[in-house]
Image (cartoon, helix red, strand yellow):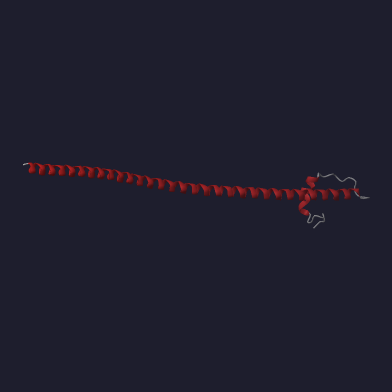
Amino acid sequence: LSHQEASTRSVVEQMEDIRKRIDAANQDKASLEHRLTQAGLDAEQAVRDTESATQEAARLKIETEEMRKKKAMELETEQTTAARERDEEDELQRVREAGKQLAGLLHIKGSRPGAASTVAPIPVAQAATASAPAWGSRSGTPR
């Protein structure tokens, strides 16, 4: 009987050991399933983060291109304005020069002996503007 009891106890102990190992394996399985689920969730989040970063990069690229175009247009406008101002200044200088030449001619014509003494003074700017197209060179000689 004692041999049979010992054998029964040994079988019971082995069964309990197997049950403990099954429980431990089930806990390991549950832990692995949880970790796998978490890894899947992390992977999904990583995909969402990547998509978001890609969209942000595309938005920044478009914004950068728009800023580059705006700066290029501003630069072109500044250059056009500066060129127009230079052209206007050159034209104003030519009108001033023509006015001085015309004033000099009127003075010479009016002060010659025998010339009519009733030369009406013409405002220089008006005379230069009115006659500037008729003069062909800077020396003041007619075309």
Where residue 43 appears, as percent x and y from the top left, is 35, 47
Nearest the viewer among 121 and 104 is: 104
In this rendering, position of residue 7 left or right of residue 24? left
Count the marks: 0
Residue that appears at 37% across and 44% down: 45
Where residue 96 appears, as percent x and y from the top left, is 78, 48
Nearest the viewer among 108 and 119 is: 108
Q: Which residue lies most toward the right here?
A: 113
Q: Which residue lies most toward the front here?
A: 2
Q: Which residue lies most toward the bottom here?
A: 143
Residue that appears at 9% across and 41% down: 5
Where residue 86 appears, as percent x and y from the top left, is 70, 49
Residue that appears at 8% across and 43% down: 3
Where residue 59 appears, as percent x and y from the top left, is 47, 47
In this rendering, position of residue 9 left or right of residue 134? left
Nearest the viewer among 25 and 3 is: 3
